Image: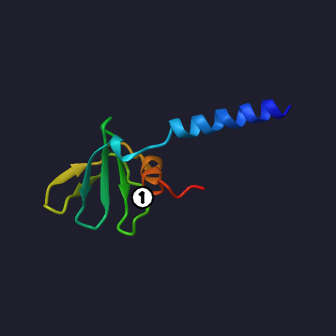
Amino acid sequence: MLKKILAIAAMITVAGAASAVDMSQVEKKIDLKDGSTIYIFKDGKMGMEDKLGRPAYMQPGTAMETKDGKRIIMNGNEVWRVDELLHQGHKG
């Protein structure tokens, strides 16, 4: 019974590590005019961090203005990926 529990715990740990997001998956990080940040991942999807450093929801297709005045359109809404990026190393 103990072996089964340990095997299940090991599988859960491996599955969690496989789904973790790291900065190597980020293609570009763009600062927006309102103080928030957009992360563009290598697969083209985007996630947003608000000006207070929290993952934030942004409706796909929403136009945003960068600090340098350019406009970009939100593609996807990868809140969970941004959450993983912001909390790397904080899980015990």
Q: Which quarter of the rendered picture does the N terminus lie within? A: top right
Label 1, on which residue? 56
Q: In terms of image quadrants, where is residue 91?
A: bottom right
Q: Position of residue 33 (x, y in %)?
A: 22, 65
Q: Which quarter of the rendered picture does the C terminus lie within? A: bottom right
Three-letter residue code for mark 1? Ala
Task: Provide the secondary structure element on which disc 1 rests.
Answer: strand
Q: Residue at x 39, y 69 (%)?
A: 52
Q: Residue at x 38, y 54 (%)?
A: 58
Is residue 66 found left or right of 57 in the rendered image?
left
Q: Position of residue 87 (x, y in %)?
A: 48, 56
Among all residues in the image, which is located at the extreme right?
Answer: 1
Total labels: the figure holds 1
Q: Residue at x 59, y 35 (%)?
A: 14
Q: Residue at x 24, y 61 (%)?
A: 32
Is residue 32 found left or right of 50 in the rendered image?
left
